[in-house]
Image: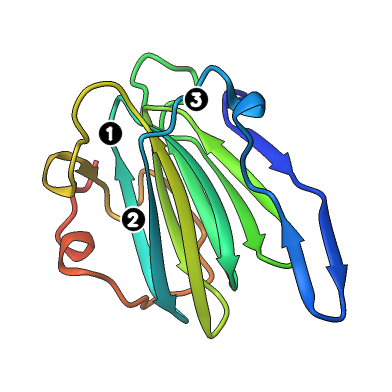
C-alpha cells in the first residue's frame, strides 16, 4: 500500500486563523485534476466505501475531524483487501493521494466535517451509479470503526458484501 501518498502541508497560523495551500501544479505534474468535490457531514455520518478503477483522489479536511479508511481492491495485489486508516483534521493540514483500485470511506468524528477531494481520471467521470460500493462493516475487511451504528446513505446501506 506504498502507492498511497501522505502529504503534510505547512500552514500559516495567527490570531485570525489558519492558511495553507492544498495544491500546486508543479507538485503534482503527472496528475491532471478534472474536478473537485466537497461533502458536508454531521457527526457519526459514514460515507463509503466507494471505488472505481481509474480515478485518483486527493483528499483533505476543509473543516472538522474525520477518520479516513482506504482499502486495496486490486485482486492481484499481495495487499488485496488490506486497509489503512488516518485521522484527518483541518488543524493539521494533510493530503492523502489515493490511486485507482482503492476504495475509500470516511466517518465524521467532530460535530461537523467538510471533506474535500480532487479527482483525476481519463475519459468520462464514473458517477456513483457506476462505482463499486462495499459494505463499511464487511467482515472480510475487518475494519475497526469507532462506531457501531453510523448514519448511512441508502447507497451505503445497500452496498455489497465481498
Residue beneath label 1, please? 52
* Coloring scheme used: rainbow
Residue 120 in view of the camera = yes
Q: Name the residue under label 3.
A: 79
In space, the residues marked 2 and 1 are separated at their CA atoms by 12 Å
Residue 48, numbered label: 2
Of residues 16 and 141, the one drawn nearer to the viewer in this rendering: 16
Farthest residue to the bottom: give it: 111
Q: Is mark 2 on a helix, strand or loop?
A: strand
Cα separation, mark 3 vs mark 2, equals 20 Å
The location of residue 129, given as percent across then percent down, is 11, 47
Residue under the image location 31 percent in, 46 percent down: 50
Q: Is residue 15 left or right of residue 146?
A: right
* Residue 2 or residue 26, whichever sits in front: 26
Up the image or down, 73 lies above or below 159; here it is above
Q: How far apart, in angstroms, are the residues tagged by discs 1 and 3?
A: 17 Å
Q: Does 68 sit left or right of 155 as displayed?
A: right
Amino acid at each position: 500500500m506504498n502507492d498511497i501518498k501522505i502529504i503534510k502541508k505547512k500552514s500559516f497560523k495567527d490570531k485570525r486563523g489558519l492558511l495553507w495551500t492544498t495544491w500546486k501544479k508543479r507538485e503534482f505534474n503527472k496528475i491532471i485534476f478534472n474536478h473537485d468535490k466537497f461533502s458536508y457531514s454531521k457527526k457519526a455520518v459514514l460515507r463509503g466505501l466507494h471505488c472505481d478503477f481509474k480515478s485518483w483522489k486527493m483528499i483533505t479536511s476543509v473543516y472538522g475531524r474525520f477518520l479516513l479508511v482506504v482499502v486495496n481492491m486490486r485482486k492481484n495485489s499481495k495487499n488485496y483487501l488490506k486497509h489503512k486508516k488516518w485521522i484527518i483534521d483541518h488543524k493539521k493540514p494533510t493530503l492523502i493521494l489515493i490511486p485507482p483500485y482503492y476504495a475509500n470511506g470516511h466517518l465524521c468524528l467532530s460535530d461537523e466535517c467538510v471533506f474535500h477531494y480532487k479527482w483525476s481520471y481519463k475519459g468520462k467521470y464514473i458517477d456513483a451509479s457506476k462505482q463499486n460500493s462495499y459494505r463499511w462493516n464487511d467482515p472480510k475487511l475487518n475494519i475497526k470503526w469507532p462506531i457501531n451504528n453510523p448514519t448511512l446513505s441508502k447507497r451505503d446501506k445497500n452496498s455489497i458484501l465481498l
